[in-house]
Image (tube, helix red, strand yellow):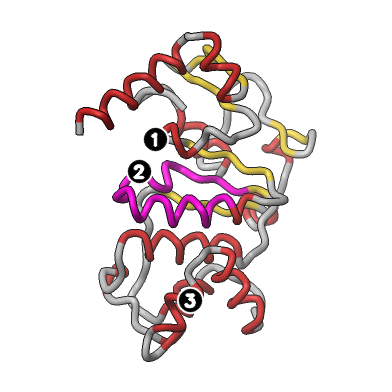
Amino acid sequence: MGASGCGKTTIISLLERFYDIDSGALLIHGEPLTSLDVHAYRSMIGLVSQDTTLYQGSIRENVLLGTSEDVGEARLIQACKDANIHDFITSLPEGYDTDAGSRGLALSGGQRQRIAIARALIRDPEILLFDEATSALDTQSEAVVQKALETAAKGRTTLAVAHRLSTIQDSDLIIVLDGGKVVEQGTHEALVGRRGRYWEMVQAQTLDREAK
């Protein structure tokens, strides 16, 4: 986490192999990322970003988008259950065959995000990347999506870029960036106790919520 322009999304782009580093080392399972086959590596990762993209077609087609293998109905349903969207889908008259509409606009922002989570989970990735996945949602939708993200993260290496600090308080490690450099790292409790940059941002968001 950190202020805008500190390098959070750049790290996500590096992990997706959109760019390669000029110096230092970026390792996956102890191996340099550049030594891994790009196609095989990307099959190991799942991404849920702030701006979810859904396409004209059914909910089923949107969840299955990007899968390169024959995925059975049971696996589709389990991914949607883990994403906390299965009950909503089955409540629709056409269920999984419901048209999502152009760019998914037939659905709410929270529903689109949970379908994006299901899309990421159906490939059973080893690594999950969340790039401010809840920042565009209202408080009620954020709570539902955050619960889905926590379920999705179980048993996987997960890296989350967060705007709302309440979404990362239970993380194993919080890394604070400032000007492209790591200035603090630790658990929520440890960082609050230091009363440094992280503590300042927690206080600022608390005051902002109280003002509203």
Residue 108 shows in this picture = yes
Q: From the viewer's perspective, is 21 left or right of 203?
A: right
Disc 3 and disc 1: Cα gap in Å? Answer: 27 Å
Magenta stretch: give its range: 128-150
Q: Earlier in the sequence, mark 2 or mark 1?
A: 2
Q: Position of residue 71 (x, y in %)?
A: 64, 79
- Residue 70 in view, yes or no: no
The label shown at residue 135 is: 2
Q: Residue at x 72, y 38 (%)?
A: 28
In this view, the mark in front (3 or 2): 3
Q: Nearer the viewer, residue 161 or 208?
A: 208
Tell me the residue that label 1 is attached to.
164
N-terminal label among 3 and 2: 3
Crowd around label 1: few <14 · some 14–19 · many ≥20 (10 Å): some
**Tag 3 secondary structure:** helix
Figure label count: 3
Q: Is residue 124 left or right of residue 83?
A: right
Cα separation between marks 3 and 2:
24 Å
- Who comes first in sequence, dot 3 or dot 1? 3
Which residue is disc 3 drawn over? 87
Q: Which residue corresponds to the image point at 41% horizontal and 59% vertical from the top-left?
A: 113
Mark 3 neighbour class, 10 Å CA radius: few under 14, some 14 to 19, many 20 or more: few
Where does the image place residue 154, in percent across and percent down from the top left? 67, 51
Q: Residue at x 45, y 43 (%)?
A: 131
Q: Is residue 16 left or right of residue 116?
A: right
61 relative to 163, above or below: below
